[in-house]
Amino acid sequence: MRIIFFGTPTFAIPALNALLHAGEEVIVVVTQPDKRKGRDRLLSPPPVREAAVEKGIQVFQPANMKDLSFLDVLQGLKPDLIVVVAYGRILPLRILNIPAHGCINIHASLLPKYRGAAPIQWAIIKGEKKTGTTTMLMDEGLDTGDILLQEEVDISPDDTADTLGQRLSETGASLLIKTIEQLKDGSLHPVPQTGTPSYAPPLRKENGRINYSSAAEDIRNMVRGMYPWPCAYCYLNGERIKITRVSVLEGSGLAGRIEKAGDELIVGTGAGLLSIIELQPEGKRAMTARDFLGGRRLSAGAFFDGP
């Protein structure tokens, strides 16, 4: 099939590779414009662009999805199918109507749960034990189109958004190939979404601030879901500190108070205790709690975020 592929982050690359491995004709890749990153604010291309260039595929990076010249180019390519994987923008109706077989999206949840931009992160933050991937026939709504295929994936207790995202990207790639195979042999039957939808809005840096009045288990889920970006964080004596790995302990303490500072760094919460295993002070590398404590005078009774 002649396919136009829309995608931006690393999550989308396994699906692109799967299409090429299956012998599909990816005629063009569309991805987001380059963005400035890092302290030097240098322009950095999206991972999908780099992957496409490496494979010799033409790349478009439109700044405006409704640019008429861009739309005319896509129309002229006469694709059989458009595949969208974490592109980052909603496609206008004119693009949805271009391919003969419509537009298929890989979404990293079991729709209608966790519609939106950050389904992997919010599934972990909300303490879900299972999630999955969905291939969906796209419409103009936010992840509201008919379901094509779904595959369930377990969320392990140690999963972060990074590790779970890697598994879901591979699951989504294989599910995409199954979807296209069924499309070709006529056995694919779109089914309207049923059940109560939930939403996974984009994460912002401020979403990562820890509220130690929450239960320790809820904080642990937040730390996992926020890693590697934007990362959970709190303050100690005005210093911003990222919290990257924690565990939950039985016991009680005052919310935000350091209950133990020696071989371990244990903090009170609204319910239970939180052992901080790994953290990253501002402007420094990530380190163990023991290394952190070894470099500063910190004792039990101090508070994260103030008393």
Image: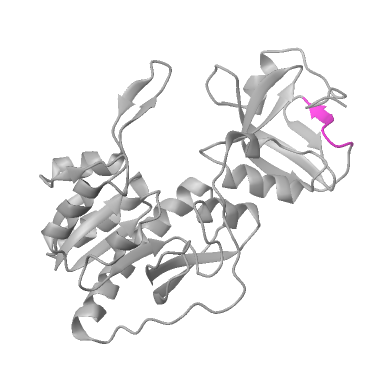
Residue 297 versus residue 291 in the image, above or below: above
Q: Is any part of residue 157 visible from this angle?
A: no
Q: Position of residue 11 (x, y in %)?
A: 36, 50
- How many numbered marks, from 0 up? 0
Location of residue 303 by image quarter: top right
Residue 148 versus residue 163 in the image, above or below: below
Q: Position of residue 276 (x, y in %)?
A: 69, 35
Q: Nearer the viewer, residue 263 or 235?
A: 235
Report whether 140 appears left or right of 268: left
Q: Is residue 265 magenta?
A: no
Q: Is any part of residue 197 visible from this angle?
A: yes
Which quadrant does the C terminus fall into?
top right
Q: Is residue 255 magenta?
A: yes
Residue 295 versus residue 16 in the image, above or below: above
Residue 87 versus residue 137 in the image, above or below: above
Which quadrant does the N terminus fall into?
bottom left
Residue at horizontal 42 percent and vertical 76 percent from the top: 146
Q: Which residues are magenta?
A: 254-261
